[in-house]
Image: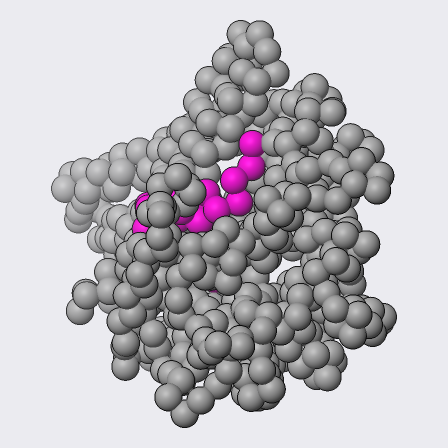
Amino acid sequence: MSRTPYVIGITGHRDLDEAATQYATQQITSLLASLKSRLALTPIVVVTGMADGADRVLAKVALKLGYPVTALLPLPKEEYRKDFSEASWQEFNQIIANPLVECSVVEQLHECAPGESMSDQERDTQYWVLGQHLICQSNLMIAIWDGENTGLTGGTSDVLLDYLDAQPRRRNDRISGSAATITYLHREDSQQQLMGRQAYWVPVDKTEHGHSRSEQTPQVCFLSGEIGTYELECFPSIPKSLLDDMAQLEEYNEQIQVLEEEGAINRNYSLLNDYDLTRAPIPTDLLKDLDTEFLKADAVAIDNQKHSDSQFTLFSLIAAAMGFLFLVYAKIVASNYLLIGYLVLFLIGWRYYRRIQKRHSFTNHLTARALAETLRTQFYLLLIGRNNHKRPTHLMNTCGVSQFEGFNWIKHIILSKVPMHLDHKTHQKHLHYNVEFVCEHWLMDQTSYFERKTRILSQHHHKLEHIKSFLFISSALMAVMLILFKYAMTDLVFYADINAKSVTVLLMGLLPFLLGVWEIYQNKMAVKELLWQYRTQSVLFNEAKQHIEKADTLDQKCAVLSELAERALLENFIWIIHRFHREHEPPTAG
């Protein structure tokens, strides 16, 4: 399995003069070098539409540095050729002949008869499709742009604003007649936490003959569009949130590398098991890539959960052992060896605590689980044509998960790994098969899983409650024994100065202490919250199962599955919020 790449996309003007081209080349070279210094294990991949100007500037720089390039063409080659001069077309073919370049054509929303050319409107639509793919796949967008909003569908400003979520999502909600003016807010502080995506802006000036670069042109900066529609924040240096996201992705790839070497990524959990790939509504390589990313995220989540649970267990055992040694010292024998043992356990616990702080197992478990469950739901929604690749990230922003440190980076993977497919006609071809597959392998399997987990965890919880009751009763009986048989127990000597009374007092102190340690352990493990989540998810999936059984059409079944996916995903995010708050203080605490 390959490591998860960091994808650089580009949007920009075609008509760049030599000065603008040279300046953009310098700035992009500097940016890619800076990124590579921070992404030692993470591959950098470039995606471009290969048009004249900005697209090829990025492609040439990437190839010079040895980075792979994905060339996404909006039109079939022969049709695309009409947009270039002969010299430009020769350069195009020279670039794509490089073995580092992988070339593909986006889906065509308009069918043309052999020998028939596309209309201008149809060509514009295809450039919009290309823009949507660039928006979907890019973890960081480079914009070689004059800063003006033209309002042209599929144009540089349209792609950039859409990428930054800085314009209405629906085209008919945008200002008609003329393009809306963009407001720029210059920020000096790059340390603030940004939840949205950022772009790298290389400004150029619009001239009579195209786009150039002059001394009056603004300097390069990073853009964020999360504060409002048609409002962009400009940061002079790379935002801290973007650096944090890259660091988290690097750590994720490091964990994947270790798990691969250990053979811990289990293909038995593949979402494609028993699936007929000839019925896939999207290219199979995209579906396999999504499945692979799910397997990696799931393996990382499981591995970190094991470490996190072992940490909780070890700390509980250390606390119990320290308490036992203290009680023995206070009630049985005042031996220095007991104090030495107490200090040794304390030092072991402190050293282990400092060591695991660097691993972030608990947070990594939650983030990887959120990523895996999101990829799982999006996989099944893709099969039935109900996927919205931006919806999970909007849910994360709405419920507040994105605000937690260490969580925002997973949106980069969700957006770039969940394929966007605009040709809905292919979804209908094998829709019946795909709906049945989703119902069997997701709805029914998850229903059984949550019912089983709820039953097991409930039984475990009830057993523990019985044990707690037994310990409480035992402690009370010992108190009664001390009241009634205090002197008789004092005379009953077991060894040296150790009598029955001392042992009973020890046990009376030990039992409540162990109960307290156990309650803390259960609290840390959040067993009750986990049981609550399993029960809630079980209810959701059972309700959906009943609605599916009553549904008469495929469209009704798809609607049920789509609603289930969103509700289940939201429940998972809510559970993660509770778990995260249990272990972390609010940002203003202390």
Numbered marks: total: 0
* Res 329 → quadrant: bottom left
Q: Where 529 sits versus 252, above or below? A: above
Q: Which residues are magenta?
A: 386-410
Q: Position of residue 40 (x, y in %)?
A: 63, 79
Residue at (41, 75) in percent of width and height: 222
Q: Position of residue 438 (x, y in %)?
A: 64, 27
Q: Position of residue 322 (x, y in %)?
A: 35, 66
Q: Position of residue 581 (x, y in %)?
A: 30, 53
- The image quadrant where one finds the N terminus is bottom right
Q: Nearer the viewer, residue 439 or 536?
A: 439
- The image quadrant where one finds the C terminus is bottom left
Q: Nearer the viewer, residue 371 or 280?
A: 280
Decide if residue 563 is in sight here: yes
Left or right for 209, reference 570: right
Decide if residue 341 is in sight here: no
* Res 540 → quadrant: top left
Residue at (66, 62) in percent of width and height: 49
Q: Where 342 sits versus 169, above or below? A: below
Q: Where 517 sits versus 563, above or below? A: below
Q: Where 92 sits versus 80, above or below? A: below
Left or right for 54, reference 357: right
Residue at (67, 73) in percent of width and height: 56
Q: Is residue 576 magenta?
A: no
Residue situated furthest left in the rendering? 483
Q: Nearer the viewer, residue 225 or 206?
A: 206
Left or right for 241, reference 140: left
Q: Is residue 398 magenta?
A: yes
Residue situated furthest bottom in the rendering? 215
Residue at (61, 52) in percent of width and height: 127
